[in-house]
Image (cartoon, helix red, strand yellow):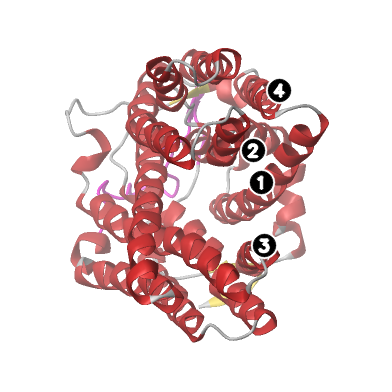
Amino acid sequence: MATEATAHGGYLDILRAPHAARLLAGTLVGRLPNGVGPIALTLFVRDQGGSYTLAGGLIAAYGVATAVGQPLLGRAVDLKGQPRVQLPAAVLSALGMALLALTGIGHLALAYAAVVLAGLFTPPLEGGLRALWPSVLGREDRVHRAYALDAVAQEVMFTVGPLLLTLLVSLWSPAAALLVINVLGVLGALAVVLSEPSRAWRSAPREAHWLGALRSPGLLALLGSFFFVGLALGSITVAALSYADDAGTPSVYGWLMAALGLGALLGGVAYGARRWSGAPERRLRVLVLLLALCYLPLTLTPGPVAMTALSVLSGVFLAPALACAFIVVDRHAPTGTVTEAFSWLVTTFGVGSALGSAAAGPAVELAGTVAGFAVAGVGGLIAFLVLLATGRALHVPVTPVSPAPADARHAVSAGGPTPVHTEKNAH
């Protein structure tokens, strides 16, 4: 099923490609405001004397607005190009957070309006980067390895981002940290949209349809599955907090979250170091099943050291599952909807994570910490069952395979199509 990657096919090969390192770094920095948004909002509200309830309300409003905005902005990118959408969106999002930082929480309606503006215009940089990889890297195996690198880089961002935020708060204040993080976000988006690949990229012509990317049955099946993957991950964040409270050591929570991220990082590195053959849809089912099975041991809730080890195990298959899901999105997104399709994956995963956190809370209160971790295991198993039940929809990509050896439907530049052989023929 897999073979060792050649030396020239590793992550360094990806990063040495023209524009690749800049695009990856710019996207990660551009996504910082969204990645640390909930933590930044909590720290800001508490510093202003607000309650946790208010912080939760603002975070929820921000999350819902982001979920609504991502696919809409993704569709706009497919229609209008990246620079005309990504940079204005980043500026408007930053202005929303700046408004909150400067006016505070004294006027609740204004505070909610500010976070809704910030969430609604969060630029779809994540989907945009994945749309650019084919035109930047060319070969199919390099694009797939870039997807794995992307998943690994996300884990680094979610580890470094909170540390940077904490440093800024300690140096200045939560309000100043909110401003600095959002300025960095705009600079990251600027680095992306000023690059040659972003300026030259054009989506393939798309069929006019009000459903856009959602008219693909295979994509709907994938989104349904990753909603529950997100639910599982969101429930772990709450259950781990309950575990730390039970242990009487609040710092354990940080160790568990870091261990989960470490597991995902290790899994992503290992996955990207190999060249995989066969249909990615079948491989994704295996990866999601393994992900679910690795969530189940968390319900044992042993001592902190053993629990940290189980947390590492629970994260091992997360980045590989995400990287494989990116390939499946690319295969099933209708022509001309690739950015929108990737944005839907981000949205669905995020909504699932939020609902998982919401579901784990009552579970912990009613039946204890074990029940919170059980939500994660059940969510993972449902995600696998969705993929199993929708196997027929996932079997054939929505766009027919071209008889030519190269398919450039997602990599059209201003100068014409860039050949990219996708994995559609691998069964």
The answer to the question of whether label 1 and label 4 lie on touching residues, with beta carbons closer than 8 A, is no
Q: Earlier in the sequence, mark 1 or mark 4?
A: 1
Q: Which residues are magenta?
A: 396-419
Residue position marked by numbered label 2 in the rendering: 28
Provide residue 168's location: percent of width, then percent of height.
Answer: 76, 33
Q: Dot 3 corresponds to which residue?
A: 258
Give the CA distance from mark 2 to mark 3: 19 Å
Could you classify mark 3 by the number of other residues whose Cα lies within 10 Å: few (under 14), some (14-19), or many (20 or more)? some
Q: Quadrant of residue 426?
A: bottom left
What amino acid is labelled 4 in the image?
Ala
State how far apart marks 1 and 4 are (Cα).
20 Å
Q: Residues within 10 Å of mark 2 (few under 14, many from 20)?
A: many
Q: Which residue is mark 4?
A: 176
Q: Amino acid at mark 1?
A: Met
Is residue 320 visible in the rendered image? The answer is: no
**In this view, the mark in front (3 or 1):** 3
Query: How far apart in space, not on screen, are marks 2 and 1 (Cα)?
Result: 7 Å
Q: Is disc 1 placed on a helix, strand or loop?
A: helix
**Mark 2: amino acid:** Leu
